[in-house]
Amino acid sequence: MASHWANSKANIFLYHQPAASAHDRAEPSVPLDLQFVFGTPYHPMSSQRFTSSDRRLSVAMMTYVSSFVRTGNPNPSRVWAESILPRWQQVLSSEAPPTYLELSPALQNRQGLSQSACSFWSQLGPKLTGQTGDLGAEPALTAELPVASPPNQSQTEKDAYS
């Protein structure tokens, strides 16, 4: 899907939040990535549930999102030191497995997110579409069936609505 949007020349940046993250410590009613974006690990009511690496990840996410909102690119600037915050790679339409940023304390760019789970859509789906396109012409539409008026409505009332 990300490659599809990248074909439209949109700025596409993909991320993945591993299941083994701070889910057991976070508020379950709000997705963990949103909690990081909005700084929940720093809120006095919830800060004790998060680790220092969770707080660093939250700062990174706030930085990425605020930069994306300002510029359309999550990377703060061209001169940003990648040792501080890794450059988030844009998804390119030519990539076979798209690059994504893994939201973990290591913040690494990876490839092949859910590749086997998405193989139906990326491989089998187009094959099926190509095969079913050869089945023949679309069936012809038949003439409309006459519509009977409801029993409590006179024919003149029905004609007024037509």
Image (cartoon, helix red, strand yellow):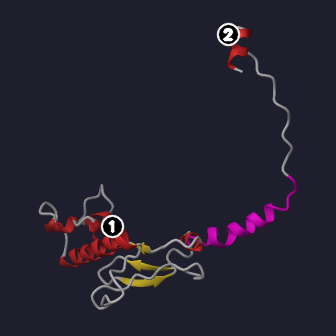
82 vs 154: above or below: below
Q: Which label lies toward us, 1 or 2?
A: 2
Upstream in sequence: badge 1 or badge 2: 1
Which of the two residues, 74 or 125, is positioned nearer the viewer here?
A: 74
Query: Does the image show residue 19?
Result: no
Q: Secondary structure at mark 1?
A: helix
Q: Main secondary structure of the magenta part?
A: helix
Which residue position holds label 1? 33
Instruction: Report the Cα–Cα distance between label 1 and label 2.
Output: 57 Å
Which residue position holds label 2? 153
Which of the two residues, 73 or 102, is positioned nearer the viewer here?
A: 73
Q: Secondary structure at mark 2?
A: loop
- In the picture, measured across the screen, residue 91 lies left or right of residue 83, that is right
Residue 15, position in %: x, y?
42, 74
20 vs 157: above or below: below
Number of numbered markers: 2
Query: Does the image show residue 9?
Result: yes
Residue segment shown in magenta: 117-137
Indicate yes or no whether the magenta region holds residue 130.
yes
Residue 83, position in %: x, y?
29, 91
The residue under label 2 is which amino acid type?
Answer: Gln
The residue under label 1 is which amino acid type?
Answer: Asp
Quarter of the view holding residue 70:
bottom left
Residue 18, position in %: x, y?
38, 73
Residue 93, position in %: x, y?
58, 78
| Quadrant containing the N terminus in the rendered view | bottom right
